[in-house]
Amino acid sequence: MKELPIHIQLDARSSKTLYEQIYEYIREEIRAGRLLVDEKLPSARFLAQYLQVSRTTVDMAYGQLVAEGYLTARPKRGYFVAAVENLYTVETEFGAEKSEVKRTDIREETCRYDFSPNVIDMRFFPYATWKKITRNILVDAKSHMFALGEPQGDVELRTTICRYLHGSRGVNCEPEQIIIGAGNDFLLLLLEKILGRHIHVAMENPTYVRAYKMFCSFAYPVSLVPVDEKGIRVDCLRQTDAQIAYVMPSHQYPTGVSMPIGRRMELLKWAVEDKERYLIEDDYDSEFRYKGKPLPSLQASDTAGRVIYIGTFSKAIAPAIRISYMVLPYPLLERYRQECGFFSSSVSRIDQTILDEFIRDGYFERYLNKMRKQYRMKHDLLLNEIKPLEKYFRVTGGNAGLHILLTDTRGRSEEMLEDAARAQGVKSYRLGEFRMGENLMAKEGGFLMPSTMILGYGGLSMEEIREGVGILKKVWS
């Protein structure tokens, strides 16, 4: 490492917190290429001493940079600058073509306010608690902790997840039905081995592009089914030969639609009409709902064992946790044991034990309550700030998740709106990036929201939301 690759000077009189000043300085150094790929940054302790700030302040800045993909944390080695290609892959993974990536690369430096729907706020993460749990576990670790462990994941964590899902989402399952994996990508790869080849999949459109690309990589035929104000259109789904339907009923991504009970029953009825039909329920951000009670999972209404439930801790805790889980119906569980039981668990036993204790001892629930409050405040602020834009846009997708949608009512294109905002340093996101190919039955279903922009607020501070929306009110009015 160089003598010190960071030469930031903090301003105690600035309206920005010390954590934000450190975070923004390092982020701009990386974007400008002054901090190079794989270059090691000073340790949090060293930088805190150098800048005369608390260790927690530096930890928060580093944690946010890791969460956004600018840095990678390597155990026992420190923090390193992430590969530039990876940064832009993260920011454009939801459907952008190579030409779009190049355009983003060139103009990214001008975007001071990034309304990404995929970034969460790491400023309140209980680093001290996580470190204490880790330290205690490593001090008391026995030899079995370093053994390979069960392929499905440690039974202690599966039991804890089982209880959590039943209490929070109404999921009915036993620990033996749960498989723990390092992220949803791994679980989908495993599911491909369980379901077999040449399975016809139906997906909502617009949809979660990463899952769409995963299914395409399996050489699965994929039918794109339109979404209306109640979710996936089951009448259009029936006109496909799909055996699997991938859905997000509690909070459809990216439209924000919540599926009512009537549509859920239609979907479950479709599934039971053929013995080889299943529903994949992606319950990616069910923890964040700001009005009314949390919606129960689709799996909670499944009495025939046709729902494959997938969830993750990446949004509820931190992206770097990389621990997801899948609940298999018993027929598929038997198939998993026969066909895939030899696969080793992709999550270390130490990480599993840390997460298990974090949930069991109540830290997870307290952290969720704190983040719900923070996100609710940001959600309410954003809705209040954009009220002047309601003359030109229809606002939807609120009350849950970490983003809202603005549908233009004056016939302007998404590209025009995006470019106008970007020219003033604000990055917004086009719904068109999440539309894959042509909608099945496009004439009948159509798109729920043509010319729609997505504004995420999870990773922005309250002040950044105010300033960013202030710019949007000028350029989009």
Image (spheres, grey):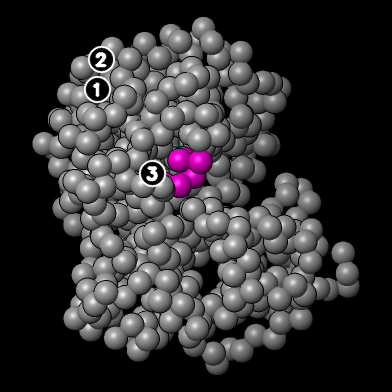
Magenta-colored stretch includes residue 209: yes
Residue 204 location (% of width, % of height) = 32, 42
Quarter of the image where the C terminus is located:
bottom left
Residue 143: x percent and y percent?
71, 22
Tell me the distance, in whole angstroms, between the alpha carbons under discs 1 and 2: 6 Å
Mark 2 or mark 3: which comes first in sequence? Answer: 2
Q: Earlier in the sequence, mark 1 or mark 3?
A: 1
- Counting from the top left corner in percent of width and height, residue 77 is at 78, 51
> How much space separates mark 1 and mark 3, taking CA atoms?
21 Å
Determine which quarter of the picture holds residue 51.
bottom right
Residue 276, visible in the rendered structure: yes
Q: Which residue is mark 1?
A: 271
The image's mark for residue 409 is none
Q: Nearer the viewer, mark 2 or mark 3?
A: 2
Inspect the image, locate mark 1, and give the three-letter code of the amino acid beneath it. Answer: Ala
| Residue 283 location (% of width, % of height) | 35, 40
Q: Which residue is mark 2?
A: 274
In terms of secondary structure, where does tag 2 sit? loop
**How far separated are the C-alphas under marks 2 and 3?**
27 Å
Tell me where the magenta segment starts and ends, as one range: 207-213
Q: What residue is pinned by disc 3?
A: 284
